[in-house]
Image: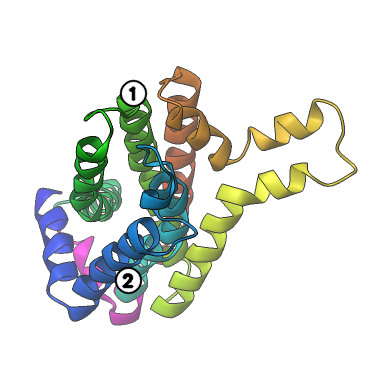
Amino acid sequence: MIIIFIKEIRTFFSSLIGYMALGVFLLLLGLMVWVFPDSSILEYGYATLDPFFELTPMVFLFLIPAITMRAFAEEWQTGTYELLVTKPVTATAILLAKFLAAWTLVLLALLPTVLYAYTVHELGAPKGNMDLGGTIGSYIGLVLLAGVFVSIGLYCSSLTRNQIVGFLLGAMLCFLVYWGFHYISRLPVFVGRIDDLIQQLGVDYHYASISRGVLDSRDIIYFISVMVAFLMATAHTIHKKIG
């Protein structure tokens, strides 16, 4: 499992696409958080990273499917998965190794953004005048959100031999899981507490809850449950493909 994990990391960084994906992610976030006036932290007048935490899920919609699109689609296309399963490793271990590798890559992409928090901390008046609890909670929320999107991306990659199709399916399904329930709850047919219950099915509801700085066990369980559900769906798809 560790060997497959390392192989996935090396494969990502052995291609120009890997560096481009991380570079575009950091460049796009940097421009939106610090340069573009409509979302710039410098235009807020007080020390906060709220724009960063609001914008990152949207950028994740493209970054994470780009990372996961080749995980299984390339294996199906080249026929290497059949060779992989002949090694002394289980299909579950292969899936978990790919999941952890992709999740690690997203966390590596997030790591440089800690400088944003340090910068805002130093720019506060007085210095350090920012909501540290909310910031830490939001970062935890991003880590969990990344795990959910990675599990969705792997599932979509397992459905097809075409990496581009895997990317498009991943981006679409991530969008639906994140924002879909919110928009459905706003339909006029849902009234009273029904719309609240539908909203609670969406990832954005639980991400916003954690971003307040309060770690509720219900939110943690929700994120883990969604990850497990999509990983199980991926395992089922793999089992059907290899018979």
* Residue 177 visible in the snapshot: yes
Q: Is residue 174 left or right of residue 186?
A: left
- Crowd tier of the residue under label 1, counting other residues whose Cα lies within 10 Å: few below 14, some 14–19, many 20 or above: few
Closer to the camera in the image, 84 or 227: 227
Residue 111 lies, with reference to residue 121, above or below; the image says below
Q: Is residue 81 left or right of residue 187?
A: left
Q: What is the three-letter code of the residue carrying label 2?
A: Arg
Extent of the magenta region = 75-87
Please give the label number shown on residue 133.
1
Residue 73, image x and y in percent? 37, 72
Most common secondary structure along the magenta stretch? helix
Q: Is residue 84 magenta?
A: yes
User: Residue 204 occupies which quadrant of the picture?
Assistant: top right
Q: How many marks?
A: 2
Q: Dot 2 lies on which element? A: loop
Residue 185, image x and y in percent? 76, 42
Color scheme of the displayed model: rainbow
Residue where numbered disc 2 is placed: 70
Q: Dot 1 lies on which element? A: helix
Q: Is residue 235 left or right of residue 93?
A: right
- Is mark 1 in CB contact (under 8 Å) with mark 2? no
Residue 146, image x and y in percent? 37, 47
Residue found at x 39% / y 36%: 141
Q: What is the three-letter code of the residue carrying label 1?
A: Gly
Residue found at x 24% / y 75%: 20
Closer to the camera in the image, 187 or 95: 187
